[in-house]
Amino acid sequence: MKDILTMGRFPLTDDRAEPIDWMVLEEDPEGLLLVTCRVIAGAAFHGEDTGIIWRTSELRRWLNTAFFETAFHAEEQKRILVTPSENKPNFHYRTGADDPTDDRIFLLSYDQAVRCFADDEARKARPTPYGEQHGAWAGIDGCSWWWLRTNARLGDCICRVRDLGSISVDGIVCTASGGVRPAMRIARP
């Protein structure tokens, strides 16, 4: 069982901001890698069905501006580390390499989704009621699929974690029902 931390506020059950629970995925001397325990929103990776990469995606812009600025107060923002991210080509297809990015809030990469979770079951995530009401799709068992930041097999696809926890390479970037599980690295207290 992974450790859980609470940090920031975002609408979870209705339009009122509530504390966000984060799962600790990795620890190192500098800090902790966290991902939200639940899918907190539904959103397209990018608004247009075009060849897009993480660096220029609308979802990256939203996470690092509107979400970062409204979900965290000033002291919390100081704890969130700027994280350099290698955006490697898709492991299976060797396509879609992207330039490195520096983000405070980001999506997990394909490699992180494999390395940080023991198996498909561990990757499964349910949407918050607010997330489901605002676009996050929920399957028969109540779990959502959620975006990763790694480009996939086609120019208009991004990797995603399916509702059953397996990783897929067929996330169409303009699909608004994509689940959002923000990730971040924070400094140790």
Image (spheres, rainbow, N blue to C red):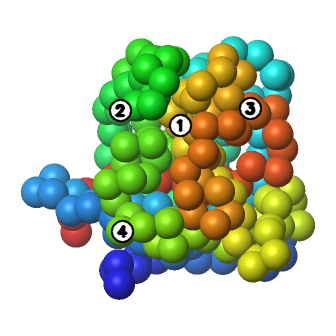
Nearer the camera: disc 1 or disc 2: 1
Looking at this view, is 119 or 104 the one in front?
A: 119
**Quick one: SS at disc 2?**
strand
Apparent side of residue 181 relative to residue 110 in the rendered image (left or right) = right
The amino acid type, in three-letter code, at marker 3 is Val
Q: Position of residue 87 (x, y in %)?
A: 40, 27
| Number of the label disc, if any, that sits on residue 85 | 2
Q: Is residue 145 left or right of residue 76?
A: right
In three-dimensional space, the C-alpha distance between marks 1 and 3, rounded to whole angstroms, equals 11 Å
Mark 4 or mark 2: whose residue is earlier in sequence = 2
Q: Are marks 1 and 2 in contact (CB under 8 Å)?
A: yes
Q: Which residue is mark 3?
A: 173
User: For the view shown, which residue lies furthest in the bottom direction?
Assistant: 1
Q: Nearer the viewer, mark 4 or mark 2?
A: 4
Q: Assign the N terminus to one quadrant of the image.
A: bottom left
Which residue lies at the image location 40% right of the left edge and 31% below the top edge?
91
Q: Residues within 10 Å of mark 4 (few under 14, many from 20)?
A: few
Q: Furthest residue to the left?
A: 29
Q: What SS does tag 4 mark?
A: loop
Instruction: Measure how far apart labels 4 and 3 are at the Cα level.
Output: 27 Å
Q: Which of marks 3 and 4 precedes in the sequence?
A: 4
Name the residue tied to disc 1: 149
- Contact check, label 2 and label 3, Cβ < 8 Å: no
Label 4 sits on what residue type? Answer: Ala
Report the quarter where the C terminus lies: bottom left
Earlier-in-chain disc, 1 versus 3: 1
Query: Is residue 20 visible from the viewing direction of this image?
Result: yes
